[in-house]
Image (tube, rainbow, N blue to C red):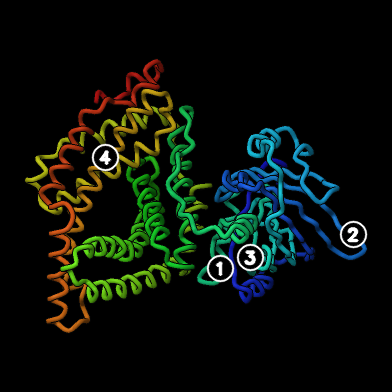
Amino acid sequence: MADGQETELKLAASPAMLAQLRDHPLLAGKDKPLTLVTRYFDTADAALHAQGATLRIRETGAMPEAGVKREQTFKNGSGSLRRGEWNTKVDGETPDPQAFPATARRLIEPLLGEAKLRPLATTRIERTTRRLKFGASTIEAAFDAGTVEAGRRSQPISELELELIGGAAADLFALAGQLPLGPELGWSTESKGERGHVLALRLPFAAARASEVALTPDMTVTQGFQAIAWNCLAQLLGNYREVLASGDPDAVHQSRVAIRRLRAAFSLFGDHVADERSPVFRAEWKAAADTLGPARDLHVLIERVEAAQQDPQDDTADLLKHLHAARKRATRKAQAALSAAAFQQLLIGFAEWIERDVPQSSEPLGEFAARTLGRRRRKLTKSPALDKLSEEALHALRIKGKKLRYAAEFFGALYSDKKSAKDRRAFTKALGKVQDCLGSVHDLAVAQDNGARLFAGREPITAAGLAAQLATLLDQHGPSRKRLIKSAAKALDRVAEAPAWWKFPFIEQKSSISTLSPD
């Protein structure tokens, strides 16, 4: 690992699986045993953690005669694969930020200000490392077993870390793809430092939401897709393990959103990223989204019924009991799917494809973005009057609007000037309104059509009564279908009338003017 960047893949493993991996032929090598005691530090208001940074002092002991080595480390960012890392020797028991190189100090100092550092958590790890050759790369495999402690609270740690020493990051995933992935071995992006902070500060789960994609105008279409794909994958990785752990509704929702964004990226980039593997990935991602759909739909449905429960005349106890049981079953199915070997192989195989095998296109990303946004808007706003469309057509229109909104968000960093940013926010807000209104229309239709399926297994008369009660509640509480359609139509008009903000940053780029859409 070159000073300044760490490239690492972490796999959470059960203790039994970690023991099994020690005998895996692909992980064979000379053992180097280490005892690691690491103290993590932060300010009283957790300023480092808030910015995805960690500061630690690690004491490393190998053989007794070798003594103890003490080193401080600053890590910046919580990326799924790469993040900044700087290491220096330290003599005292508290970190010395001034001992880091200038690049790291420029990152640390604004975060700390005048605040004092305090110890938050400690990890005690028995580590065995092995140096491997795989593909064209050198990889260090670390088998870690131990605990993270904060006061009287502690949690076990059992994981395999694969760190790139030299070569291609894709080889990390190629190696991981040949390990026994599944319920006992899966990709995790939660660092030991993050776990320590959560334990020490008793932090509740915070879902990872979509973030701005780090795009620049000098990128090619291929580079743009890679950045977007990693952004979507990071959002998924930040949520899916909480789905496994607790079934948290927000984790389910944001995992589904991440996959939808990823599927939208495939659609937006089309032939530019098409090869023999991309149709398989697209089908597998759709299937993964579908496993989350029932649980998410029931979360939303329960919220709507609970809101309707404010009317004392509505006795919803039996209905809610049934819906909660159905949600529990749907969540268990989602958890089983996300922990299975097939999903873990999808995560790892897709990451390898992003890193090594995405088809190459040298077209400038700015030109592609402007053309795509213009064309997508024209297709969306040429729709007939919404009140004349069938349920299927409205749903299809909603999907078009969602893809356009994702595109506007994906390409947002290319349009950072004040006017473009303001116009883009208004544009995406209007698209969000279209999506929300048509989504509610779709929910009403689904509730009406799927009553028999939703209450399958109940005695027929009881099932019919519950289905009718649900349909009535949804119809009587909240906006009517007619009102939702009217609001969606108004928002769609705002989308059609919005200025073409995607042109502005490229007006003076003579290479792109001739290819811009006239929209």
Left or right of 69, for residue 329: left
Q: Residue flagged by tag 3: what amino acid is it?
A: Glu
**Residue 159's disc number:** 3
Is 488 rendered above or below residue 479? above
Q: Indicate the position of residue 359 as horizontal and vertical percent values.
A: 44, 43
Q: Quadrant of residue 500?
A: top left
CA separation in Å, label 3 and label 1 = 8 Å
Q: Residue flagged by tag 2: what amino acid is it?
A: Gly
Q: Is residue 342 visible?
A: no
CA separation in Å, label 3 and label 4 = 42 Å
Q: Which residue is mark 2?
A: 67
Residue at the spot 52% in from the left edge and 52% down from the top edge: 352
Q: Sort mark 2 into few (<14), some (14-19) or many (20+) by Cα contacts within 10 Å.
A: few
Q: Which residue is mark 4?
A: 431
Q: Which residue is mark 1?
A: 185
CA separation in Å, label 4 and label 2 = 62 Å
Could you say which is closer to the camera, residue 206 or residue 355? 206
CA separation in Å, label 2 and label 1 = 34 Å
Q: Earlier in the sequence, mark 4 or mark 2?
A: 2
Q: Earlier in the sequence, mark 3 or mark 4?
A: 3
